[in-house]
Every structure is written in structure tokens, then in C-alpha cells.
Amino acid sequence: MKTKIVSYLLFVMMMLCVATSDAALQMNLDYNMLDFGAMNTGESKEISIKGTHHNTLTCTSTNNMTWYLKAQVVKPFSFMQYTIPEANFKWTVVSVGAGKGIVNGGVNFTFPFSRTPTLIYTSDPDDNTGTAIDISFRYSLDVPENQVAGNYNGTVRFIMIETL
Amino acid sequence: MKRISIIAVTAFIISIAVFVPYSDAVNLNIDPPRVELSIKPGEEKHGYIVISNLDTTGDAAHVRVYVQDLVYLPDGSNDFLPENSTPWSLSEWIKVGPTEFDIPPGKQEMVRFVMNVPQGATGGHYGVVFFETGVSPSKSKEVGASVNIRLGTIVLVGVEGTQTFKAKLKGISVTGPDDDGAFETSYTVFNEGNTLVRPKGTLKIIDAKKNQVDEIDVNKEKSGVLPQTSRRFSQKYTKTLPAGTYFAQVMLDYGGDVLLGGQTSFTVK
């Protein structure tokens, strides 16, 4: 009976711990649509619906370990069998809020998306104790001159993980 | 009455301005982001990872869970490979579940794992359990992309009683100064053992008269070196030194029986 009560209390305590579990590794993306609207062949367009940027990824870690953020194309802009080259689709980090880590290439440096995950940000020890790091992005797309007209849709992925 | 209408209209406009761009938000948390286990051959251990949908206003988050292998890249980050593609893979030992589910706003899901170490297994084995939001097709009727996010829990398993810690320093060099006047000290550690090592220690700057002029910690982040692989570590030295010849001396403790040490000379003009 006593064992049952202890087990029950342990279970309840475990559930409470789970229910109140705080940020360990957290990623908050405020807007997950990159809508370039109508574009002509040969046209270049940059999107930043919030003025200075398009969306913000807020990364938080409380685990006291270095973490990093990467980006990759999962599915390039495609329409039927036609594809816009990944290299024509680019991101730019425009700010990192309170982040003290390293922005790959530096703030305002533009990177082409790739199928291979590309490093965006590596945390500083000061970033690993619960500070929310707001990484804001702008995106651009160049439609090739000879691109077939159509509704092109794609998917990109952001990855957050600690170093081994 | 008019004032109430104005307030109502203003509130409505503000609510649209605030909430429309956020309707496609996603906010996930995983806990823990790292699992370290020591297991005897032939035994198994259980655990769980909690994934929370912290977005309280949007839709349920569709999440897929899967295991991948990992390797180091020169920039210190990891790359992820399909299951069973590295000698230190644990993907045949681990079972996770559930592997696909929806988490309502403000709720969480407990993903359980069972780690079953086979008889005869040795050393350290490593992998990552990924939690990825479902790919929602772009809503754009013209040109558009959707964004999904992926968080990973790193899993490290040591097979109890079988781990050998052995490493060697393969080279040390100092280059520079660069445009900012900084020197870069770099060294490579080769892991000869069968388990991850984390070589941590100091870099001493010694002048020609054998006086120590500085000492800095290296690999404070405790970055690891996977079994039977090399990893290059580098450290910028930004302090100004008077002209002369100096020695950069690295001393590392990786958890083995002996410390690793090496030095090289460099000149400040």
C-alpha cells in the first residue's frame, strides 16, 4: 500500500515536472509563409513584409551548451516538372536581437539556399542560459529569363540543435 | 456611442495588424535537447522527450519524429545522415514513439524511446532524434514557399565497460597576424579510441626567455571528437604582444590516462 502511494506521488511529481518544463531548446517562427506574389520572368524580388525584415526566428536554449541554426531547401520552387534553381532563392540575416553569437558571413550578408543545410548562427555561451535570440530574415528570389510561367511552390527548413 | 465605435474600429484594425501576420506562426520546445546514457551490453534503458506546442493561438502542430546519424563538419556544426551510415550509429538500437502526431495549441506530447544495446556492442554510439513540423503546402497561388522547423535531441550512448579513451595531438600551428592584428592558433586532435572525447585545456603563450605571458582556456564549449576521426580546433589570440619570438603551448585533458601537449613558435614583428 505504502509502495503504491509512493509510486503514485512520484508519478504525480513527474507529471508536474513535465507540465511545467521550461525552455530547453525552443524555436518560435513568427510567420512561416514566404509569398513572393506574381513575378515576371527575369524579375528579382525581395520580401520583407515587416519593413526591415520578413519574419523572425526566436531561438532559446537553457541547456548551457553551444547550439546553432541552419537553413536548407527541402523542396525547391517547382511547378509541374519545372524548377527555379535553389541558388536563385536567398536569405539575409538582418538582425540578431540580443544574440552575442556568430552570424555566418555577418549581418546583412546574403546566402543562397541550398539542399545542404547551411550554417546561419552559432550561439555564444551568453546565449545558452535562456536569452531569447531574435534572428530576423529578409528573402529574395530571381526568376530566370527563360523560366516557364506557372505557380511555383517550395519548402524550406530551419534546424536548431546543440553541438555534439 | 461614437467614442465606443471609434475604439471598437481601432481595436479591430489593431487586431488585424497584430494577428494576421502571426496566423502562420509555429513555436515548439523540446526537453531535453540532449540525452546521455551509459548502458551495459545486452541491456536496455527507457526515457522520454517532451515536445510542446507553445503557440497558444494557432492550429495544432503536426510533428514527425525520426532518428538520424550525425557527423561533424569543419565549422563545428553537425551534418545529419540517414540511419546506419556511420560506424557510431545507434539507429538500430533505438525505437521511438509515437512518430507522427498533432499537438493542440498550448499542449505537449511525450515521445518515449527504448535504447536496446546488443551483446558484443562496444564504445560510444551517437545519433539525433528529430522533431519536425509537418510540411504544410505553400498557400501562395503565385510564387511562394512555406517554412518548417526542425529541432533535435542529441543522443549519446556509452556501452559500459567497453569504452577506450585514446587520442593524440596531430599538429599545432600559429598563423597571422590578420588584418585586425590577431593570431590564430590551431591544433588537430585525432581520436584513436572508440568513444567520443572532449579535449579541453589551456593555451599558454611563452616568450623567448621562457616566461609565461598569457594563458587562455581552449575548447571551453567541450566540443567532442568522434571515434577514429580528426577534428581541428582553432583559437584567435587578439592581445597585442611586443615584437619577438614566442611559443604557443597547448595542453589538453581528454579524459585519457595522459594529457596531450604540443607547442610551436611564432614571431611578432
Image (spheres, coloured by chain):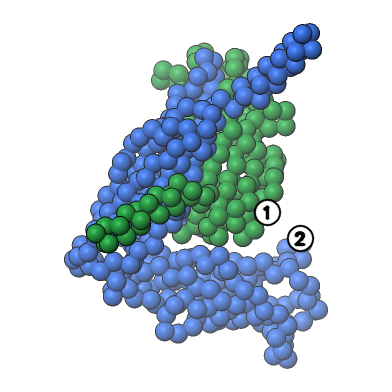
Chain colours: A green, B blue
The foreground one among A118 and A53 is: A53
The foreground one among B12 and A29 is: B12
Q: Which amino acid type is shown beneath numbered disc 1?
A: Lys
Quarter in which the C terminus of chain B is drawn? bottom right
Chain on which label 1 sits? A
Whether residue A35 is situated above or below residue B29 in the rendered picture: above
Residue at (72, 28) in percent of width and height: A51
**Disc on res. B179:** 2
Q: Which amino acid type is shown beneath numbered disc 2?
A: Asp
Asked whether residue B230 appears in the rendered view, the answer is no
Residue at (53, 73) in percent of width and height: B200
Q: Is residue B19 left or right of residue B84?
A: right
- Residue A19 placement (x, y as % from top left): 45, 46
The foreground one among A126 and B125 is: A126
Whether residue A25 is situated above or below residue A31 in the rendered picture: below
Residue farthest to the bottom, as pictured: B209
Picture quadrant of residue B244: bottom right
Q: Secondary structure at mark 1?
A: loop
**Disc on res. A100:** 1
Whether residue B227 is situated above or below residue A57 in the rendered picture: below
Q: Secondary structure at mark 2?
A: loop
- Residue A48 placement (x, y as % from top left): 67, 28
The foreground one among B174 and A141 is: A141
Picture quadrant of residue B214: bottom right
Callouts 2 and 1 in the same chain: no
